[in-house]
Amino acid sequence: MPRQITAFSNPLIKRVRSLREKRHRREERLFLAEGLRILTEASEAGVLPEFVFFAKDGAQHPLARALIDAVEARGGEAIETDRDILAKLSGKDNPQTVIGVYREFETGLARIDRAAADIWIVAQSLRDPGNLGTILRTGDAVGAGGLILVDDCVDPFSVEAVRATMGALFTQRIATARWPEFLTWLRAGPGQLVGTSLNATQDYQAPRYEAPTFILVGNEAQGLPADYEARCDLLVKMPMLGKADSLNVAVATAVMAYEVLNQRRPR
Amino acid sequence: MPRQITAFSNPLIKRVRSLREKRHRREERLFLAEGLRILTEASEAGVLPEFVFFAKDGAQHPLARALIDAVEARGGEAIETDRDILAKLSGKDNPQTVIGVYREFETGLARIDRAAADIWIVAQSLRDPGNLGTILRTGDAVGAGGLILVDDCVDPFSVEAVRATMGALFTQRIATARWPEFLTWLRAGPGQLVGTSLNATQDYQAPRYEAPTFILVGNEAQGLPADYEARCDLLVKMPMLGKADSLNVAVATAVMAYEVLNQRRPR
């Protein structure tokens, strides 16, 4: 039976609200996801929140009802509250009707089973939460195994990143590592490391990619460091006919990932 | 010779600052672009601002110097100011060192010469300025002619959209139209209208696209209306192997646009 909270001063409300800050997420090992669509995607992927907050009218929806029942059956807590408190938790004037509080996933490379997929995406110093979310969605679409975040990247558990993943956060594996650690792990097994770079001489449609393919993209402004490029098995570039000579990093990732997929899929 | 403005109360400062609001942009037919990179891209594309604001240290850069000289030679005005005022104009604590005020482009369909390019991108009810910017950058990269915004889209002259285009706003044509007007214009000349849709049965790599190809993408949340899809010459979809069954609209646009380009480019 859901309990009710309607006081802003409630300690749980304060605690959950603090998860919008990275420092508190790291301490608590919890993060927020908002909206019935994302929470249902998570549930379908077998991931349920520790807490689910909902407005009374939000619980009318059959998917919300199913979610609340599942959370309670699994020993989590469902909390009925009001729109004002949901707005406070989400930081938005017009909040979603359900908000979930999830346990952070372990993000060690040891959790990555490279044999589980033919495509993996590796992003170095990725800074924009929207790009991270878009890349995870693309990974989901091309059947990638997940995303490996190398060096200092945006926090994948930030509210903005979670929102931008549209639920793909729960279907894709996420790992974080420094570059040397990643390279050591990569070279301990099969895997072709393909860097995308403006410095490449090879067209991205020229090679036949080998599975598992690790698609490596660099920071939004700087691209990949030269010494990282030197460690790739292949460096490739997309044609750019325009004047700007740059693509958004999530776009470059997607164009590469679809090329790798297209080479392998039956048609 | 640049004049100096250091007073927040200066009427020009107030006027320029107001351009961050759509209402004032429409009244003045002016918009803001920030940063030496974007302003230089614009200049290389033959577009100079009516006003350029710069901090004293910003003018040291040779590109900034060249820009200031070009603006003054063309009868525009260069205004030396300080970081506080640049911050006020840009709305950011850490502003770029140069800010330009540009005359809005005409965005009637009549300005689109469809014979000028083999690819055109058409976005319907696009709402996110980041997506608009990313799509324009992609258009620049694939050699598209420009972007036609159908129905109620985000303002391409908003500060956020201009920033996200990274300068491609000045290399790509932009038009705005309601759907009936667009269709009438389209059917008055050659052009294959290719819609991307989850409802399509045809794989996006199956057809041979005909030039000029008009790639049509729909709203971020809703996709294309069914009756719009019915008016397309082709409806195609990308493979989606994942659970989420959705791609970011700028990603879908890019994957399609590179397919069209790849069918035609020499390799």
Image (cartoon, coloured by chain):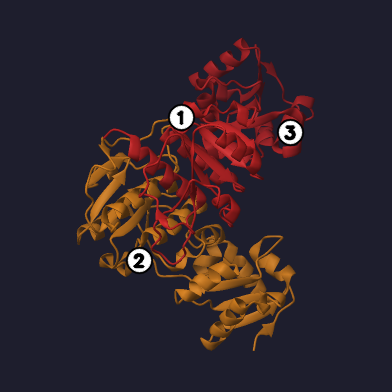
Chain colours: A red, B orange
Residue at image position (30%, 35%) is B199
Query: Disc 3 versus disc 1: distance between alpha carbons?
Result: 29 Å
Q: Position of residue A23 (x, y in %)?
A: 76, 37
In the picture of the structure, the residue carrying the numbered disc 2 is B108
- Quarter of the view holding residue A29: top right
Q: CA gap, disc 2 to disc 1?
A: 48 Å
Q: Is residue A102 visible?
A: yes
Near mark 2 (Cα within 10 A), the count class, few <14, some 14-19 or many ≥20, is few
Residue that mark 1 sits on:
A117
What's the residue type where badge 3 is placed?
Arg
Return the residue nearer the eye: B14 or A175.
Answer: A175
Residue A214 picture location, percent across and down? 49, 39
At numbered mark 1, what does the secondary structure look like: helix, strand or loop? Answer: loop
Earlier-in-chain disc, 3 versus 1: 3
- Distance of mark 2 from mark 3, alpha carbons? 51 Å
Q: Are marks 3 and 1 on the same chain?
A: yes
Q: Chain of mark 1?
A: A
Going 58% across and 33% down the picture, which residue do you hit? A174
Q: Depth check: B207 or B220 in front? A: B207
Amino acid marked by disc 2: Gly
Q: Amino acid at mark 1?
A: Ala
User: In the drawing, does residue A232 fall left or right of residue A87?
Assistant: left
Residue denoted by label 3: A26
Cβ atoms under marks 3 and 1 closer than 8 Å? no
Question: Based on the displayed image, in which of its 4 quarters is residue A100 positioned?
Answer: top right
